[in-house]
Amino acid sequence: MRKLFVTLLASLSSAAAVADFPEKPITFVVPYAAGGPADLIGRAVARQVSQLSGQPVIVENRAGAGGNIAGDYVARAPKDGYTLLFGSSPVLVMNPALYKNLKFDPLTDFQPIADFGSLPNAVLVSEGAGITSVSDLVAKGKTTPLSYASAGSGGTTHLSGVLFGQKTNAQMLHVPYKGSGPALQALLGNQVMATFTDIFTAKPFVDGGQLKMLAVTSDHRSLLFPSIPTLAEAGVKGVNIHVFFALLAPSGIPDAVKQKLSSLSQAALKSPELRKQLESRGLDIPSNNTPEELSHKMRRETQEWAVIIRASGASLD
């Protein structure tokens, strides 16, 4: 009887704690260094969730190993909803095919909470290259190896070029750099012919007339650049590449906490202030944004990226 009473008391105490969630600061762990798209988007979301929850939301950058350091850290964090991963496609759907010895499984070790939108890549060339269209770029790549800069092996800036070459039969010469900044500088310095960089990072260089955007890699045009065609519209079918940004918790958090985090995320996305910030960065925000839909998206894209990565031969360990 006493044991039953203690168990009941503990259950009531746990239920009360869940009902009052959050009672202390929440941490968003970002898998990349400060200043990049995931960091800036994560901080915008964190500010809105903090206002709605009445608790501080701390953004902690744990960069390294292609995002795997942060992924492993959050997968092993306490299952109480206070340590969350603000991740993106490389960590969530690409790394399982790129790393043979991954210490966590994104599909089983995380509980999806909310999808905060996706960014396509831009097909970029320098303004002085004399290339004015995707067809020009393809023609160039059929006569000489088309050198393109990436932010590092295995990411979308690399694999966009791989898929572009597969679909056009252009000769692609991959030149990896340590980040999008150095890759863009290489293009600006005419050290390479092209690059495939997300539209938010590319925007200042396009607006400033330093780089020319030929197309976007998504299956529909970007609201940020409505006059720029998709690759499909430019004649290159079968390329639909984007990076999505999502909030996830360690698997095993209480259902009530998951629901509270999901409700806070949905409320944040309904905020005109946050939506304006996300859309100004070029994000395409999904209309059906539930934990179940995010889970489905992760499973689908994990399979799609595995096919592309196997075909490319890319491996990072």
Image (cartoon, grey):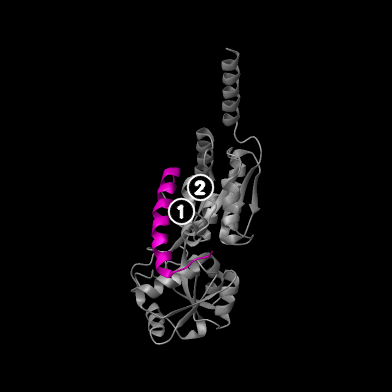
Q: Which residue is mark 2?
A: 269
Residue 248 image point, x, y percent: 53, 46
Local SS, label 1: loop
Q: Is residue 310 visible?
A: yes
Residue 5 versus residue 294 in the image, above or below: above
Say what amino acid the circle numbered 2 marks. Answer: Leu
Q: Which residue is mark 1?
A: 285
Q: Which residues are magenta?
A: 288-317
Left or right: 169 with respect to 248? left
Residue 232 image point, x, y percent: 34, 69
Magenta stretch encompasses residue 292? yes
Q: Residue at x 44, y 69 (%)?
A: 313
Residue 28 image point, x, y percent: 61, 48
Badge 2 density bin: few <14, some 14–19, many ≥20, Cα 10 Å: many
Q: Which image quadrant for residue 164?
A: bottom left
**Which of the two residues, 174 or 205, is positioned nearer the viewer here?**
174
Magenta stretch encompasses residue 206? no
Badge 1 density bin: few <14, some 14–19, many ≥20, Cα 10 Å: some
Residue 125 versus residue 256 in the image, above or below: below
Quadrant that contains the N terminus: top right
Left or right: 254 with respect to 172? right
Q: Main secondary structure of the magenta part?
A: helix
CB under 8 Å between discs 2 and 1: yes
Residue 173 image point, x, y percent: 47, 79
Local SS, label 2: helix
